[in-house]
Amino acid sequence: MKNSLYIIAIIFCVLIGCTSTKSAVVTKEKPTGTKNDTVRIVNEELEYEVIIIDPGFSSWLVSTALPRNYYSQSYLENKNRLWISEWNSRVAQPFRYNPNLYEMTINYDPTINYGYEVNYLIYNYLVYFQNTYRQKLFGHVPLR
């Protein structure tokens, strides 16, 4: 069964069920007729897929994000776990937090090894999100 991981505009939805590390392929697509950037990650066996669509994220990733392997995978996983936990808390409080920013929960299982590339892109999307929309999910957020 093909499982998916989607980050759409400001909607960030994760649907992952793979249990092993797979190498990932990253492609960049430009949807026709839109101004959105699209970053897509797929593992070789197509057990999961990550799609990030947010205006400016792709160019921010190339121009501003720190290079791959700057952070360890465990660092990225820890930050993602904390930030996603706070994200999900905000989804559950639509009267306190903007429901246009926090529309859907993220099903991120810290016991699953998603691999470096998936964690790298989720981490950088969350840095981009926090800096672009002036949100602070938890702890230190790198200013870039």
Image (cartoon, rainbow, N blue to C red):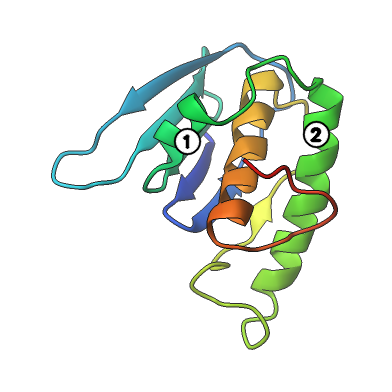
First in sequence: mark 2 or mark 1?
A: 1
Query: In the orientation shown, which residue stands out farthest toward the front?
Result: 144
Question: Which picture quadrant has residue 48?
Answer: top right
Query: In the orientation shown, which residue stands out farthest toward the bottom?
Result: 95
State the SS at label 1. helix
Left or right of 16: which side holds 100?
A: left
What is the x, y in percent for residue 11?
49, 58
Q: Residue flagged by tag 2: what amino acid is it?
A: Glu
Left or right of 27: which side holds 24?
A: right
Q: Residue at x 81, y 20 (%)?
A: 72
Give the label on residue 60, or none. Answer: 1
Question: Which picture quadrant has residue 112?
Answer: top right
Left or right of 128: which side holds 52?
A: left
Q: Residue at x 66, y 28 (%)?
A: 120
- Please give the residue where the numbered disc 2 appears in the rendered image: 77
Give the label on residue 89, or none. Answer: none
What is the x, y in percent for residue 24?
56, 15
